[in-house]
Image: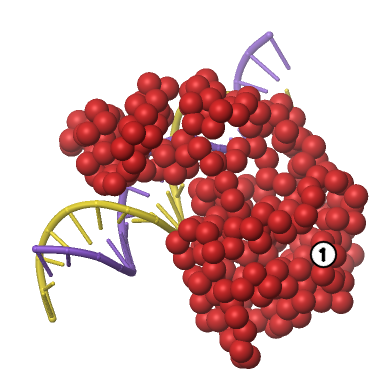
Chain colours: A red, B purple, C yellow
Amino acid sequence: MVRAPCCEKMGLKKGPWSGEEDQILVNYIHLHGHGNWRALPKLAGLLRCGKSCRLRWTNYLRPDIKRGNFSLQEEHTILELHNLLGNRWSTIAAKLPGRTDNEIKNVWHTHLKKRAAANHDDSNNNNNHQQQQPTTKKRRSASKKSKTASVNDDVSSLTTGDNGGAQSNDAKPDDFSSTEEMDESFWSEVLSADSSTSTDHDFPAAELGSGLYDDPLASFVSSEGDGPGSGEEAAAAAAAAGLAHSIVDYTSMDFWYNLLTGDNNKELSELPPI
DNA sequence: AAGATTCTCAACCGCGGCACA
DNA sequence: GTGTGCCGCGGTTGAGAATCT
Protein backbone atom coordinates (compact mmCIF):
# COMPACT_ATOMS: atom_id res chain seq x y z
CA MET A 1 0.00 0.00 0.00
CA VAL A 2 1.06 3.51 -0.54
CA ARG A 3 0.21 5.13 2.71
CA ALA A 4 2.68 5.75 5.42
CA PRO A 5 2.80 2.54 7.37
CA CYS A 6 1.98 2.82 11.01
CA CYS A 7 4.08 -0.12 12.03
CA GLU A 8 7.00 0.08 9.70
CA LYS A 9 9.15 1.99 12.10
CA MET A 10 8.74 -0.79 14.56
CA GLY A 11 9.97 -3.29 12.04
CA LEU A 12 6.59 -4.94 12.02
CA LYS A 13 5.25 -6.88 9.11
CA LYS A 14 2.28 -5.81 7.07
CA GLY A 15 0.34 -7.06 4.11
CA PRO A 16 -1.30 -10.42 3.61
CA TRP A 17 -1.15 -12.85 6.47
CA SER A 18 0.57 -16.17 6.07
CA GLY A 19 -0.92 -19.40 7.26
CA GLU A 20 1.69 -19.62 9.92
CA GLU A 21 0.79 -16.22 11.29
CA ASP A 22 -2.87 -17.13 11.26
CA GLN A 23 -2.21 -20.26 13.20
CA ILE A 24 -0.14 -18.45 15.74
CA LEU A 25 -2.83 -15.86 16.23
CA VAL A 26 -5.65 -18.37 16.44
CA ASN A 27 -3.76 -20.60 18.81
CA TYR A 28 -2.86 -17.72 21.04
CA ILE A 29 -6.40 -16.39 21.23
CA HIS A 30 -7.75 -19.84 21.89
CA LEU A 31 -5.37 -20.21 24.77
CA HIS A 32 -5.33 -16.72 26.23
CA GLY A 33 -8.07 -14.71 24.62
CA HIS A 34 -7.35 -11.23 23.41
CA GLY A 35 -7.27 -9.06 26.45
CA ASN A 36 -4.98 -6.47 25.06
CA TRP A 37 -4.57 -6.23 21.34
CA ARG A 38 -1.63 -3.94 21.67
CA ALA A 39 0.31 -6.45 23.68
CA LEU A 40 -0.97 -9.52 21.92
CA PRO A 41 1.43 -9.69 19.00
CA LYS A 42 4.42 -9.44 21.24
CA LEU A 43 3.08 -12.07 23.58
CA ALA A 44 2.10 -14.32 20.73
CA GLY A 45 5.35 -13.83 18.93
CA LEU A 46 3.93 -12.13 15.90
CA LEU A 47 5.65 -9.35 14.01
CA ARG A 48 2.40 -7.47 13.56
CA CYS A 49 0.81 -4.53 15.23
CA GLY A 50 -2.13 -5.11 17.50
CA LYS A 51 -4.45 -3.37 15.15
CA SER A 52 -3.55 -5.71 12.36
CA CYS A 53 -4.08 -8.72 14.62
CA ARG A 54 -7.46 -7.46 15.73
CA LEU A 55 -8.52 -6.86 12.16
CA ARG A 56 -7.36 -10.26 11.02
CA TRP A 57 -9.18 -11.92 13.86
CA THR A 58 -12.44 -10.02 13.65
CA ASN A 59 -12.67 -10.04 9.88
CA TYR A 60 -11.30 -13.40 9.05
CA LEU A 61 -10.24 -15.81 11.73
CA ARG A 62 -13.10 -15.62 14.17
CA PRO A 63 -14.74 -19.05 14.31
CA ASP A 64 -18.26 -17.72 14.01
CA ILE A 65 -17.71 -15.98 10.73
CA LYS A 66 -19.99 -17.11 8.00
CA ARG A 67 -18.27 -17.14 4.67
CA GLY A 68 -19.73 -17.26 1.24
CA ASN A 69 -22.33 -15.29 -0.60
CA PHE A 70 -24.88 -13.17 1.07
CA SER A 71 -28.36 -14.57 0.88
CA LEU A 72 -31.25 -12.56 -0.45
CA GLN A 73 -32.44 -12.12 3.05
CA GLU A 74 -29.12 -10.78 4.18
CA GLU A 75 -28.95 -8.37 1.30
CA HIS A 76 -32.44 -7.26 2.03
CA THR A 77 -31.55 -6.68 5.64
CA ILE A 78 -28.49 -4.69 4.72
CA LEU A 79 -30.46 -2.51 2.36
CA GLU A 80 -33.11 -1.88 4.92
CA LEU A 81 -30.72 -1.15 7.71
CA HIS A 82 -28.52 0.99 5.56
CA ASN A 83 -31.56 2.90 4.52
CA LEU A 84 -32.31 3.38 8.17
CA LEU A 85 -28.89 3.80 9.72
CA GLY A 86 -26.60 4.91 6.96
CA ASN A 87 -23.01 3.75 6.89
CA ARG A 88 -23.03 2.31 10.36
CA TRP A 89 -21.55 -0.94 9.26
CA SER A 90 -20.81 -2.30 12.66
CA THR A 91 -24.40 -1.77 13.72
CA ILE A 92 -25.63 -3.44 10.58
CA ALA A 93 -23.16 -6.27 11.08
CA ALA A 94 -24.55 -6.81 14.54
CA LYS A 95 -27.82 -7.72 12.89
CA LEU A 96 -26.26 -10.24 10.58
CA PRO A 97 -24.77 -13.07 12.57
CA GLY A 98 -21.50 -14.26 11.16
CA ARG A 99 -21.00 -11.26 8.97
CA THR A 100 -18.38 -8.63 9.59
CA ASP A 101 -18.68 -4.93 9.10
CA ASN A 102 -15.89 -5.10 6.59
CA GLU A 103 -17.66 -7.73 4.58
CA ILE A 104 -20.91 -5.84 4.64
CA LYS A 105 -19.14 -2.70 3.64
CA ASN A 106 -17.59 -4.48 0.70
CA VAL A 107 -20.87 -5.96 -0.41
CA TRP A 108 -22.52 -2.63 -0.16
CA HIS A 109 -19.94 -0.88 -2.27
CA THR A 110 -19.67 -3.62 -4.85
CA HIS A 111 -23.31 -4.65 -5.26
CA LEU A 112 -25.94 -3.11 -3.14
CA LYS A 113 -25.07 0.53 -3.63
CA LYS A 114 -25.58 0.19 -7.35
CA ARG A 115 -28.82 -1.63 -6.89
CA ALA A 116 -30.08 0.84 -4.41
CA ALA A 117 -29.22 3.65 -6.76
CA ALA A 118 -30.73 1.85 -9.72
CA ASN A 119 -33.90 1.24 -7.85
CA HIS A 120 -33.97 4.77 -6.64
CA ASP A 121 -33.84 5.88 -10.23
CA ASP A 122 -36.41 3.31 -11.05
CA SER A 123 -38.74 4.72 -8.50
CA ASN A 124 -38.38 8.07 -10.22
CA ASN A 125 -38.82 6.68 -13.65
CA ASN A 126 -40.79 3.52 -13.86
CA ASN A 127 -40.34 3.20 -17.58
CA ASN A 128 -36.66 2.48 -17.54
CA HIS A 129 -36.88 -1.16 -16.77
CA GLN A 130 -35.06 -2.24 -19.86
CA GLN A 131 -32.16 -0.02 -18.98
CA GLN A 132 -31.84 -1.43 -15.55
CA GLN A 133 -29.33 -4.04 -14.59
CA PRO A 134 -26.72 -3.13 -17.12
CA THR A 135 -24.60 -5.71 -15.45
CA THR A 136 -22.81 -6.87 -18.52
CA LYS A 137 -20.45 -8.94 -16.53
CA LYS A 138 -21.69 -12.23 -15.44
CA ARG A 139 -21.24 -12.74 -11.80
CA ARG A 140 -18.29 -14.88 -11.27
CA SER A 141 -19.59 -18.36 -11.21
CA ALA A 142 -16.51 -20.02 -9.96
CA SER A 143 -15.49 -19.00 -6.55
CA LYS A 144 -12.95 -16.32 -6.41
CA LYS A 145 -10.18 -17.94 -4.52
CA SER A 146 -9.01 -15.95 -1.66
CA LYS A 147 -5.47 -14.79 -1.87
CA THR A 148 -4.98 -16.79 1.26
CA ALA A 149 -7.31 -19.59 0.37
CA SER A 150 -5.04 -22.33 1.49
CA VAL A 151 -4.56 -20.48 4.68
CA ASN A 152 -8.27 -20.18 5.14
CA ASP A 153 -8.77 -23.85 4.68
CA ASP A 154 -6.25 -24.54 7.34
CA VAL A 155 -7.60 -22.00 9.73
CA SER A 156 -11.20 -22.85 9.12
CA SER A 157 -10.61 -26.39 10.07
CA LEU A 158 -8.73 -25.09 13.00
CA THR A 159 -11.38 -22.72 14.16
CA THR A 160 -14.71 -24.03 13.05
CA GLY A 161 -14.29 -27.61 12.14
CA ASP A 162 -16.59 -27.11 9.21
CA ASN A 163 -15.74 -27.46 5.58
CA GLY A 164 -13.55 -24.47 5.72
CA GLY A 165 -12.77 -22.13 2.88
CA ALA A 166 -13.77 -24.68 0.33
CA GLN A 167 -17.38 -24.16 1.18
CA SER A 168 -17.08 -20.47 1.23
CA ASN A 169 -17.79 -19.45 -2.28
CA ASP A 170 -19.04 -22.58 -3.83
CA ALA A 171 -22.55 -21.76 -2.86
CA LYS A 172 -22.34 -18.32 -4.30
CA PRO A 173 -23.53 -18.21 -7.87
CA ASP A 174 -27.09 -19.26 -7.51
CA ASP A 175 -27.86 -16.83 -4.77
CA PHE A 176 -26.71 -13.95 -6.77
CA SER A 177 -27.91 -14.99 -10.13
CA SER A 178 -31.32 -15.34 -8.70
CA THR A 179 -30.95 -11.90 -7.28
CA GLU A 180 -30.06 -10.43 -10.59
CA GLU A 181 -32.74 -12.22 -12.42
CA MET A 182 -35.43 -11.30 -10.04
CA ASP A 183 -38.18 -8.97 -10.88
CA GLU A 184 -37.00 -5.46 -10.25
CA SER A 185 -40.19 -4.74 -8.47
CA PHE A 186 -38.60 -6.63 -5.62
CA TRP A 187 -36.16 -3.84 -4.84
CA SER A 188 -38.62 -1.17 -5.68
CA GLU A 189 -40.92 -2.61 -3.11
CA VAL A 190 -38.19 -3.01 -0.61
CA LEU A 191 -36.86 0.47 -0.96
CA SER A 192 -40.04 2.33 -1.41
CA ALA A 193 -41.12 0.64 1.79
CA ASP A 194 -44.74 0.81 0.88
CA SER A 195 -46.65 -0.84 3.63
CA SER A 196 -49.41 -1.73 1.24
CA THR A 197 -47.21 -4.28 -0.42
CA SER A 198 -46.17 -6.21 2.56
CA THR A 199 -47.53 -7.71 5.65
CA ASP A 200 -46.19 -9.86 8.38
CA HIS A 201 -43.90 -12.45 6.87
CA ASP A 202 -44.80 -11.14 3.50
CA PHE A 203 -41.19 -10.99 2.59
CA PRO A 204 -40.87 -9.82 -0.96
CA ALA A 205 -38.28 -12.30 -2.02
CA ALA A 206 -40.39 -15.07 -0.69
CA GLU A 207 -42.65 -14.50 -3.61
CA LEU A 208 -39.91 -15.62 -5.87
CA GLY A 209 -40.25 -19.07 -4.54
CA SER A 210 -36.53 -19.33 -4.45
CA GLY A 211 -36.48 -21.36 -1.33
CA LEU A 212 -33.10 -19.96 -0.54
CA TYR A 213 -33.89 -19.39 3.01
CA ASP A 214 -36.32 -20.46 5.60
CA ASP A 215 -37.58 -17.97 8.04
CA PRO A 216 -36.85 -14.65 6.43
CA LEU A 217 -36.03 -12.88 9.62
CA ALA A 218 -34.86 -15.69 11.74
CA SER A 219 -31.25 -14.70 11.91
CA PHE A 220 -32.11 -11.08 12.17
CA VAL A 221 -34.41 -11.51 15.05
CA SER A 222 -32.27 -14.05 16.75
CA SER A 223 -29.38 -11.68 16.79
CA GLU A 224 -31.31 -9.04 18.59
CA GLY A 225 -29.40 -7.78 21.52
CA ASP A 226 -26.21 -9.49 20.59
CA GLY A 227 -22.95 -7.70 20.89
CA PRO A 228 -22.22 -4.13 21.77
CA GLY A 229 -24.53 -1.43 20.63
CA SER A 230 -26.90 -3.63 18.77
CA GLY A 231 -30.48 -3.01 19.73
CA GLU A 232 -29.92 0.05 21.78
CA GLU A 233 -27.61 1.69 19.36
CA ALA A 234 -29.77 1.10 16.36
CA ALA A 235 -32.76 2.13 18.35
CA ALA A 236 -31.06 5.35 19.25
CA ALA A 237 -30.36 5.98 15.63
CA ALA A 238 -33.94 5.27 14.74
CA ALA A 239 -35.09 7.57 17.47
CA ALA A 240 -32.74 10.26 16.29
CA ALA A 241 -34.12 9.85 12.84
CA GLY A 242 -37.47 10.90 14.10
CA LEU A 243 -39.16 7.65 14.86
CA ALA A 244 -39.66 8.48 18.48
CA HIS A 245 -42.90 10.20 17.98
CA SER A 246 -44.74 7.65 19.99
CA ILE A 247 -43.93 5.35 22.84
CA VAL A 248 -42.20 2.45 21.22
CA ASP A 249 -39.91 -0.11 22.67
CA TYR A 250 -37.00 0.11 20.30
CA THR A 251 -35.18 -2.65 22.02
CA SER A 252 -37.94 -5.15 21.46
CA MET A 253 -37.76 -7.74 18.77
CA ASP A 254 -41.25 -6.88 17.71
CA PHE A 255 -40.31 -3.35 16.91
CA TRP A 256 -37.48 -4.31 14.62
CA TYR A 257 -39.40 -7.19 13.20
CA ASN A 258 -42.28 -4.99 12.29
CA LEU A 259 -39.98 -2.32 11.09
CA LEU A 260 -38.37 -4.50 8.52
CA THR A 261 -41.35 -6.53 7.57
CA GLY A 262 -43.38 -3.55 6.68
CA ASP A 263 -45.68 -2.64 9.48
CA ASN A 264 -43.73 0.47 10.14
CA ASN A 265 -42.48 0.99 6.68
CA LYS A 266 -44.96 3.65 5.93
CA GLU A 267 -43.55 5.68 8.74
CA LEU A 268 -40.05 4.97 7.57
CA SER A 269 -40.80 6.20 4.13
CA GLU A 270 -41.68 9.51 5.59
CA LEU A 271 -38.40 9.90 7.38
CA PRO A 272 -35.86 12.41 6.24
CA PRO A 273 -32.78 10.90 4.70
CA ILE A 274 -30.17 10.00 7.24
C1' DA B 1 -3.93 -16.42 -26.98
C1' DA B 2 -2.98 -12.21 -25.07
C1' DG B 3 -3.71 -7.82 -23.43
C1' DA B 4 -7.11 -4.71 -21.33
C1' DT B 5 -10.61 -3.94 -18.26
C1' DT B 6 -13.50 -4.79 -14.41
C1' DC B 7 -14.51 -6.75 -10.05
C1' DT B 8 -13.66 -8.53 -5.46
C1' DC B 9 -12.11 -8.34 -0.92
C1' DA B 10 -8.33 -8.43 2.54
C1' DA B 11 -5.88 -5.12 4.67
C1' DC B 12 -4.47 -0.59 5.61
C1' DC B 13 -4.94 4.24 7.60
C1' DG B 14 -6.82 8.03 10.24
C1' DC B 15 -9.91 9.57 13.44
C1' DG B 16 -13.11 9.72 17.28
C1' DG B 17 -14.62 7.86 21.59
C1' DC B 18 -13.78 5.94 25.90
C1' DA B 19 -11.29 4.75 30.13
C1' DC B 20 -7.97 5.75 33.27
C1' DA B 21 -4.34 8.24 35.78
C1' DG C 1 -9.90 19.53 33.48
C1' DT C 2 -6.07 17.45 30.88
C1' DG C 3 -3.05 14.04 28.89
C1' DT C 4 -2.25 9.44 27.36
C1' DG C 5 -3.21 4.97 25.53
C1' DC C 6 -6.18 1.66 23.54
C1' DC C 7 -10.02 0.14 20.86
C1' DG C 8 -13.27 0.16 17.23
C1' DC C 9 -15.28 2.21 13.18
C1' DG C 10 -15.58 3.90 8.53
C1' DG C 11 -13.21 5.14 4.30
C1' DT C 12 -9.95 3.75 1.06
C1' DT C 13 -6.47 1.16 -1.45
C1' DG C 14 -4.42 -2.13 -4.48
C1' DA C 15 -3.18 -7.02 -5.69
C1' DG C 16 -4.95 -10.64 -7.92
C1' DA C 17 -8.67 -13.09 -10.20
C1' DA C 18 -12.30 -13.10 -13.57
C1' DT C 19 -14.07 -11.54 -17.67
C1' DC C 20 -14.14 -9.12 -21.97
C1' DT C 21 -12.33 -7.71 -26.46
Q: Is residue A262 visible?
A: yes
What's the amino acid at mark 1? His
Residue where numbered disc 1 is placed: A201
Whole-percent x and y of residue A127?
A: 89, 65
Decide: is A38 above or below A187. above
Image side of residue A243 versus residue A71, left or right: left
Counting from the top left corner in percent of width and height, residue A178 is at: 83, 44
A185, A75: nearer the viewer: A75
Q: Chain of mark 1?
A: A
Residue A143: % across, % down? 67, 28
Give me the residue at 55% from left, 41% from top. A65
- A62 versus A95 height, above or below: above
Q: Position of residue A182 (x, y in %)?
A: 86, 50
Above/below status of A28 relative to A115: above
**Picture quarter with the N terminus of chain A:** top left
> Which residue is depicted at the point 87% across and 76% down?
A196
User: Farthest front residue?
Assistant: A31
Image-quadrant location for residue A39: top left
- Front residue of A82/A160: it is A160
Q: Residue at x 77, y 72 (%)?
A: A262
Give the left or right position of residue A100, taking residue A263 as reference: left
The residue drawn where x is 86% and y is 55% is: A206
Query: For the image shown, how many numbered marks are present on the structure?
Result: 1
Q: Nearer the viewer, residue A264 or C21?
A: A264
Tell me if residue A136 can be seen.
Answer: no
- Is the residue marked by circle 1 packed among few (<14), some (14-19), or many (20+) residues within 10 Å? some
Secondary structure at numbered mark 1 = loop
